[in-house]
Image (cartoon, grey):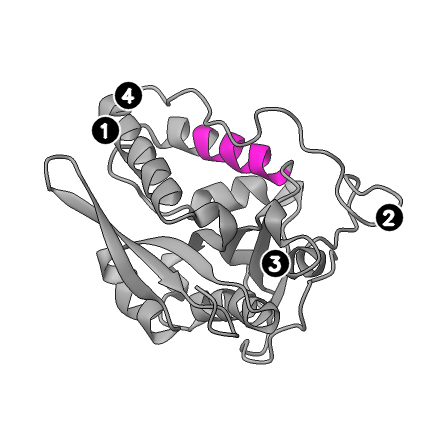
Amino acid sequence: MAALPFPHPTTLPPGFVMSRVTPADVPEMADIWSYTYWWSPSAEAMRAWNEERIRRRLRDPATHMFKIVDTTSPAQQSIVAWAKWDVPVSMAGRLREGFILYDDDDDDDSGHRKTAAEGVRSLPDPPEGADIPLMNEIFDGVRRMEEKWRAGEMLCLTHICTRPAYHGRGLGSVLLRSGLDAADAAGVPTYLEALRLARPLYERHGFTAVDRLVVNHGRAAVEIMVRAGGNGER
């Protein structure tokens, strides 16, 4: 099992284990991915798109994904929640050293990931049936917000999701808290984009809404949230 860059969370219920994501986890992770309303009506097309996007990011040395597994489930070690963090290159020697710990086939002899393949952060071709103008509006808007708030200089939580049957058990908070503890220890600020319903969760963990991305003629909005580092850095 790939090593975590921080102590295993003690707040996980018995039978739940947290570890790094591996390529074999991708299909199950894609099934858990939260619904986004520009998506194709074809579940098969969206699953394939999600799998390709996750696989690309697994090849990115600055991306770190963690999963929570329910070892007591009938499915035998079913993934029930996962999160994705992006670590800026500018954090080398601080948080970055703690997060780059891998023991899979992509490691080099020093224990660091090899250079990422070209294009790992590019999006796969849009899935058939997707609302492409709306998809472009959302991703272009997210990029503008990341540039405006200099997200590239912060630890970024770029995805977190839980199986619906496991909602309310605090698993998302465990995934979130683990990364934030590492950020606090290094005095690193954190950035994320949240749906409105998730805003109270992030506020409880010290995030502040600093902006809002409104899309689809005002029908939807994404909260831009920032959290100071452990030493008060913003």
Instruction: Tell me what residue is drawn at x 58 percent, y 61 percent.
Output: 69
Q: Secondary structure at mark 1?
A: helix
Residue 174 image position (x, y, % from top left): 50, 70
How would you rate the neighbour count of disc 4 (Cα within 10 Å): few for under 14, some for 14-19, many for 20 or more? few
Q: Amino acid at mark 3?
A: Gln
Q: Nearer the viewer, mark 4 or mark 2?
A: 2
Q: Nearer the viewer, mark 2 or mark 3?
A: 2
Residue that badge 3 annotates: 76
Query: Mark 1 vs mark 4: which is more N-terminal?
Result: 4
Q: Secondary structure at mark 4?
A: loop
Residue that badge 4 annotates: 129
Number of the label disc, if any, that sits on residue 110: 2
Residue that badge 1 annotates: 134
Residue bounds of the magenta highlight: 49-58
How would you rate the neighbour count of disc 2 (Cα within 10 Å): few for under 14, some for 14-19, many for 20 or more? few
Query: Mark 1 vs mark 2: which is more N-terminal?
Result: 2
Instruction: Tell me what residue is drawn at x 32 percent, y 31 percent.
Output: 140
Q: Secondary structure at mark 2?
A: loop
Prevalent SS, magenta region? helix
Q: Amino acid at mark 2?
A: Ser
| Residue 136 is inside the magenta segment | no
Q: Secondary structure at mark 3?
A: loop
